[in-house]
Amino acid sequence: MLSPQRGKVSVLGRTPQQAREQVANVPQRFTFDKSFPITVLEFLQLSHPHCSQQKIAQYLGHLNISEALHMKLGSLSGGQLQRVLIERSMLGDPKILFLDEPSAGIDIGGEQTFYKLVSHLHREHGSTVVMVSHELDVVANYADQVLCLNRRLVCQGKPEQVLTPETLKELYGNEAMLYRHRHQEG
Amino acid sequence: MELREIFGLPFMQRALLAGVALGLVLPFLGVFVTLRRMSFFGDGIAHATLAGVAIGLIAGFSPFIAALGIGVLFGAAVFVLERKTNISSDALIGVLFTGGLALGVVLISLQHGYQPELLSFLFGSILSVSSQDLAIILVFSAAILILLQKFLRQFTLLAFDKDTAWLCGVRVELLDLLFYVLLCVSIVLGVKLLGIILVSALLIIPPTVAKMLAPSFKTLILGGVVAGEVFIVLGLILSYLLDIPSGATIILVGIVVFLLVATRHIFVISR
């Protein structure tokens, strides 16, 4: 945990240390000793010791990896591991969820399921989701507020207002555009 | 000779009790040591305790107690220097362990004549475990086991991912320090059994064998402890029957089992 060089950092009105159990994260890369024999169930119960096996299995089902419950964590594919990390972040119903490119390595079906779950967490449980993403469609479809960074703050606001051709050009170069599907317009 | 006859001898009973206690503690801690890639730490602390043994011999009090103090001191020094300097962990352990060893050799050279205690600390002497040694081993082992059980989840989280441990409310630095202290105390307790040279083997071999067979973390801990106990009991019996050094026999039993399991792993599982 970094200490602020000036001023103070407050999370949910408390110090980061006091608020840490209401915060969850999904890292872009999770490195661990893959040869270590720990099952997915054991891994998830480490972070959530009071969570029942039934609830864990139910979430795995939502993420389409029911079969992983008793598998060794090190034997999972990249996509499966990412889903397990996503489940770990969501099991405690966090107040703030940090996601760093969370859907890297997940197929399109799994990705849609994941973002639906995150949206559900946001809408039903009032969780704030802070996500780092390079995927324009995800940002356009799910974000309420966006901060566009390319060495400096390029734009800030609601996606539909700030993701203009001009800002996209500054962020990604000439070729980037946001295309809407017809079903989204209807 | 019957087992009842072997373990009917008082010194064998003390050896068995001390061995069973350490067979629980060292492989249990060893699971976290191997997960955290700290095998060299165990070896380093064991070697550094020679300074404690020497201080005890010169000052005329129990070398065992002196070694305990020095072991914990070295562990705490590694913990602090890891965090306060930019020196890597293995380099730090290398420096401190050779320092402790060198200090021990110099101090012992000041003593004249044959030093039987010294030899027993270098190579272990489970058969010379006194009632006082046994009491120390049993009390400390029980305390370590209670703490391991109490903080099992925290130690597992720390070994797996410190960021997650912090987010789960674990007091990372404090629990890390506690782990280092428990490890140092266990190693010094094991020195009496297996000696400075061999003690880290009982920390590493049982969980390494169990790791090749275990389907889960729970079975890894259970398997490591069972393996440790089997090595100790079988090693003790063989060493008595063949009249060979007990510490080295315990380790050789472990090595034979390791080779068998590794061979199975190569030819059956990895195919």
Image: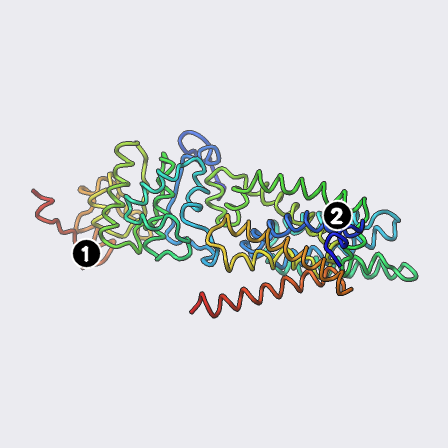
Check disc 1 and report the residue beneath it. A176
Do the residues under discs 1 and 2 have CB atoms within 8 angstroms?
A: no
Colouring convention used in this rendered image of the protein: rainbow
Residue B87: in sight, yes or no?
no
Disc number for residue B220: none
Residue A177 position by quadrant:
bottom left
Q: Residues within 10 Å of mark 1 (few under 14, many from 20)?
A: some
The C terminus of chain A appears in which quarter of the rendering?
top left
Q: Amino acid at mark 1?
A: Ala
Disc 1 versus disc 2: distance between alpha carbons?
A: 66 Å
In this view, the mark in front (1 or 2) = 2
The single residue placed furthest to the top in the displayed view is A13
Q: Secondary structure at mark 1?
A: loop
Q: Amino acid at mark 2?
A: Leu
Residue B47 position by quadrant:
bottom right
- Chain designation of label 2: B
Image spot of residue A147 (x, y percent): 28, 44
Using the image, determine if residue A50 lies above or below residue B268: above
Residue B196: in sight, yes or no?
yes
Image spot of residue A155 (x, y percent): 26, 45
**In front here: B182 or A179?**
B182
**In front here: B139 or A129?**
B139
Q: Residue at x 46, y 42 (%)?
A: A46
Check disc 2 and report the residue beneath it. B68
Using the image, determine if residue B202 lies above or below residue A99: below
Q: Is residue B258 found left or right of B48 in the rendered image?
A: left
